[in-house]
Image (spheres, rainbow, N blue to C red):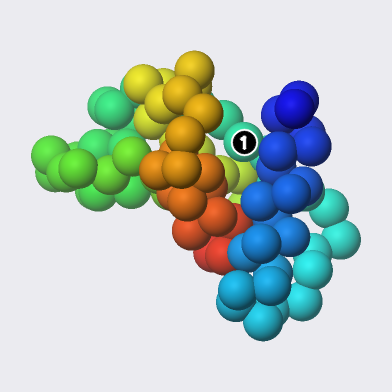
Amino acid sequence: MDLTATIAALLSWAVTLSGYPEPAQLPVLEYKLHSFFVEEACGGQECKAIGWYNDAGVVYLDARLRDKDDGFVRSLMVHEFVHY
């Protein structure tokens, strides 16, 4: 499955589980190093964040998850898509 199809499928789960309306477009998904999460999501304090939605259409996942395709990563994506 390509990334766009994966995002669309997981976003549909987020809509179903949350009851929120389906957004007009898919979120952008970007992979970032852990230092990005420390600075952007955790205010410069060391943290364990591995996913974050920036309230501007972009969902970020830790770069260490890029090549993983398992239930944990998919559930993390659904979680962040609910924020989207």
The quarter in which the C terminus is drawn is bottom right
In the picture as drawn, the residue positioned furthest to the right comes out as 24
Q: Is residue 46 above or below residue 10?
A: above
Residues packed near mark 1 inside 10 Å, few (<14), some (14 to 19) or many (20 plus): some
Of residues 73 and 24, the one drawn nearer to the viewer in this rendering? 73
In the picture as drawn, the residue positioned furthest to the front comes out as 71
**Residue pictured at 83% horizontal, 53% vertical:** 25
In the picture as drawn, the residue positioned furthest to the bottom comes out as 19
Of residues 21 and 57, the one drawn nearer to the viewer in this rendering? 21
**Residue pictured at 29% horizontal, 28% vertical:** 34
**Residue pictured at 79% horizontal, 64% vertical:** 23
Q: Is residue 38 above or below residue 75?
A: above
In the picture as drawn, the residue positioned furthest to the top comes out as 67
**Where does residue 64 sit, x and y in percent of width and height?**
36, 21
**Residue pictured at 40% horizontal, 43% vertical:** 72
**Where does residue 22 sit, x and y in percent of width and height?**
79, 68
Classify mark 1: helix, strand or loop.
strand
The quarter in which the N terminus is drawn is top right
- Tally the numbered discs: 1
**Where does residue 50 sit, x and y in percent of width and height?**
33, 39
Q: Is residue 27 left or right of residue 18?
A: right
**Where does residue 15 sit, x and y in percent of width and height?**
69, 69
Q: Is residue 45 above or below residue 64?
A: below
Residue that mark 1 sits on = 29
Q: Is residue 57 visible?
A: no
Q: Is residue 68 above or below residue 22?
A: above
Q: Quadrant of residue 16?
A: bottom right
Q: What's under tag 1, amino acid-wise?
A: Leu
Q: Is residue 79 visible?
A: yes
Q: Is residue 38 left or right of residue 15?
A: left
Q: Is residue 33 left or right of residue 30?
A: left
